[in-house]
Image (cartoon, rainbow, N blue to C red):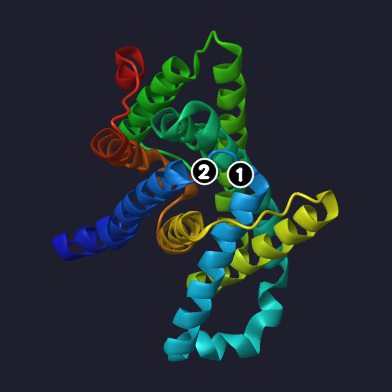
């Protein structure tokens, strides 16, 4: 085998573009945590999630109108039906749990606990997609899981509830990644992100109207919700979905602990919040 052939295979196995998309995912997701933390805590989590994703959808419409390739996808929306339904429901539940966790236990701890996606995605990828990891990737994931166990250990009841919410959100987001990998190989990932934002908005507005929990936010909170949705639900997820096409699901989540570093830095410098030493070690 020639050196050129070996280099090409190495690039196919560990595509640099895929990992760059993951860095973008981590950065923009961390920014969304900041906006989520700044929102008035008296707001119903489902109402926050609705405005969050509706802001992402409005942004996606503007982007789709400006990019010819996105406008062309409108003629092929029929092939997106299944992924539209699955991704919308999984995201609506996961996002509501995620917002609730942020309000209950704060953004640094929620971010750390969301790394449980690594374990859930690893199991789903290995069971249903036949994915395998090399030795060093396995070691990295074991370290990540060990840290997650340390972070997840709680004694106070309110913290325990918040922890369960965060772990539930991690499971639903892992299921979302698995669904995108399974169904979206031949689809445009930006269009998937656009439709997902629309679907979640529809699911949540129906829920809010049915339960009478729809609230009208003030201009500042509305801006935070919209910015959180644009950075987290749109830009970050579009980056992650594109990375999933290039890299195995288990690898995409194994690299995402970088997000926690961004979150801790933002949390410390903006809100002056930082987890306990044992949580940081985890």
Q: Please name the residue shown 32% across and 28% down the image.
A: 273
Identity of the residue furthest to the left in this view: 3
Q: Is mark 2 on a helix, strand or loop?
A: loop
Q: Mark 1 points at which residue?
A: 43
**246 vs 121: above or below:** below
Q: In which quarter of the image is residue 45?
A: top right
Disc 1 and disc 2: Cα gap in Å? 6 Å
Identity of the residue furthest to the front in this view: 218
Q: Please name the residue shown 33% across and 59% down the image.
A: 21
Q: What element carries label 1?
A: loop
Q: Quarter of the image for the C terminus: give it.
A: top left
Closest to the observer: 74 or 255?
74
**102 vs 203: above or below:** above
Q: Please name the residue shown 40% across and 24% down the image.
A: 142
Identity of the residue furthest to the right in this view: 210
Q: Where is residue 144 in the image (x, y as percent from the top left)?
A: 38, 27
Q: Which mark is residue 122?
A: none
Closest to the observer: 98 or 115?
98
Q: In which quarter of the image is residue 220?
A: bottom left
**273 left or right of 79 in image:** left
Q: Where is residue 72 in the image (x, y as percent from the top left)?
A: 54, 91
**119 vs 26: above or below:** above
Q: Where is residue 131 in the image (x, y as percent from the top left)?
A: 50, 45
Q: Quarter of the image for the N terminus: give it.
A: bottom left
Q: Mark 1: few, some, or many residues within 10 Å (few <14, many ≥20)?
A: some
**149 left or right of 20 in image:** right
Q: Is residue 185 visible?
A: no
Q: Are marks 1 and 2 in contact (CB under 8 Å)?
A: yes
Q: Can residue 5 be seen in this view?
A: yes
Q: Mark 2: few, some, or many residues within 10 Å (few <14, many ≥20)?
A: some
Closest to the observer: 226 or 139?
226
Q: Which mark is residue 40?
A: 2
């Amino acid at each position: 085998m020639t050196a050129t052939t070996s280099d090409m295979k190495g690039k196919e196995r560990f595509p640099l573009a895929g990992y760059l998309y993951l860095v973008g995912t981590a950065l923009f997701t961390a920014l969304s945590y900041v906006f989520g933390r700044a929102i008035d805590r008296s707001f119903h989590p489902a109402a926050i999630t609705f405005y969050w994703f509706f802001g992402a959808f409005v942004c996606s419409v503007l982007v789709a109108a400006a990019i010819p390739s996105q406008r062309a996808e409108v003629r092929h929306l029929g092939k997106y039906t299944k992924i539209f339904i699955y991704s919308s429901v999984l995201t609506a539940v996961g996002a509501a749990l995620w917002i609730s966790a942020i309000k209950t236990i704060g953004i640094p701890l929620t971010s750390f606990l969301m790394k449980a996606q690594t374990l859930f995605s690893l199991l789903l990828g290995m069971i249903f997609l036949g994915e395998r990891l090399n030795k060093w990737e396995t070691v990295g994931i074991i370290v990540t899981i060990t840290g997650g166990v340390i972070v997840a250990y709680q004694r106070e009841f309110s913290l325990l509830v918040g922890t369960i919410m965060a772990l539930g959100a991690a499971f639903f987001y892992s299921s979302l990644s698995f669904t995108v990998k399974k169904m979206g190989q031949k689809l445009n990932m930006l269009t998937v992100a656009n439709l997902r934002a629309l679907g979640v908005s529809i699911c949540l507005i129906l829920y809010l109207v049915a339960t009478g929990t729809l609230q009208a936010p003030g201009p500042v909170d509305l801006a935070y919700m919209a910015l959180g949705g644009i950075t987290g639900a749109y830009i970050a997820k579009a980056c992650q979905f594109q990375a999933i096409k290039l890299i195995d699901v288990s690898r995409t989540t194994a690299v995402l602990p970088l997000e926690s570093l961004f979150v801790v830095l933002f949390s410390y410098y903006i809100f002056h919040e930082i987890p306990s030493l044992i949580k940081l070690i985890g």
